[in-house]
Image: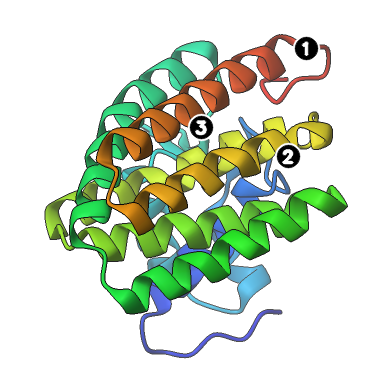
Amino acid sequence: MVLFHAENLNEQIAHHLREKIIHLELRPGSRLLEAKIAAELGVSRAPVREAIRILHKQLLVEILPRRGARVTEITGQYVHNLFEVVYELCGILTKRCIENCDEDHRIKLEGALKGIEKASEKGDVDAYHQAVYIFFILGIEASQNPILEVMLMDLLPGINRVQYASLLRRKMDLGQNARYFQEIFKAVKTGDVELGMKNMKEYIANERNFALMSIEEPGGVHA
């Protein structure tokens, strides 16, 4: 049984399930049974139901009429749709981050970059994945655009899941990915919006292409 605090119970349960979905402990297509989850977590069904609605908003879960909920499948169309939007939003994010980033966030971004570099050198997918997530969160904060923040925070879990699934199949490519972040951080320091947007969009396009390839491989995440 997992112990939760009464405060923000819906969000805590959503976080618990989100982590399992992102790290493929709950596979695409898996049914989410409210009663079973509630029993496992030692809570009532009501907060589980609300948690599932949060995950539905973040595109991690499908709610099927009269059939309950299941983890969203990772299909080619899902990846195309997700990355089409994220590609444009991350361009805006990079521009606003470079324009608005303060010294405190620059220092924190540099720390996240060091985490990316260290994890990529070791081929540590979990540490790399977490460091990239932190880099993006800091970038979102630095952008100082609350509307952009709301949109990206709902999309990030879906991106994180797709990335994690493909990263497991390409540990040797982590160093190349780290170079994108090195260039983006360089752009933040120098105020070079063009350099930052170029590398961010190349990174997002690269992630999309690898995600699509991983789906087509035998034993891919769509299975």
Among numbered discs 3 and 2, the one appearing first in the sequence: 3
Q: Is residue 45 above or below residue 206?
A: below
Among numbered discs 3 and 1, the one appearing first in the sequence: 3
Q: CA distance from mark 3 to mark 1?
A: 19 Å
Residue 171, visible in the rendered structure: yes
In the displayed structure image, the side of residue 167 where residue 199 appears, left or right: left
What's the residue type where badge 3 is placed? Thr
Q: Residue at x 48, y 58 (%)?
A: 135
Mark 1 element type: loop
Q: Which residue is mark 3?
A: 72
Viewer-side label of 1, 2? 2
Q: CA distance from mark 3 to mark 2?
A: 26 Å
How would you rate the neighbour count of disc 2 (Cα within 10 Å): few for under 14, some for 14-19, many for 20 or more?
A: many
**Residue that protrudes farthest toward the front in the picture:** 190
Q: Residue at x 56, y 65 (%)?
A: 112
Are discs 3 and 2 less than 8 Å apart at CB?
Answer: no
Q: Which residue is mark 2?
A: 174
What's the residue type where badge 1 is placed? Glu
Q: Nearer the viewer, residue 94 or 155?
A: 94
Mark 2 element type: helix
Q: Residue at x 27, y 51 (%)?
A: 191
Q: Which residue is mark 1?
A: 217
How would you rate the neighbour count of disc 3 (Cα within 10 Å): few for under 14, some for 14-19, many for 20 or more?
A: many
Q: Nearer the viewer, residue 59 or 31?
A: 59
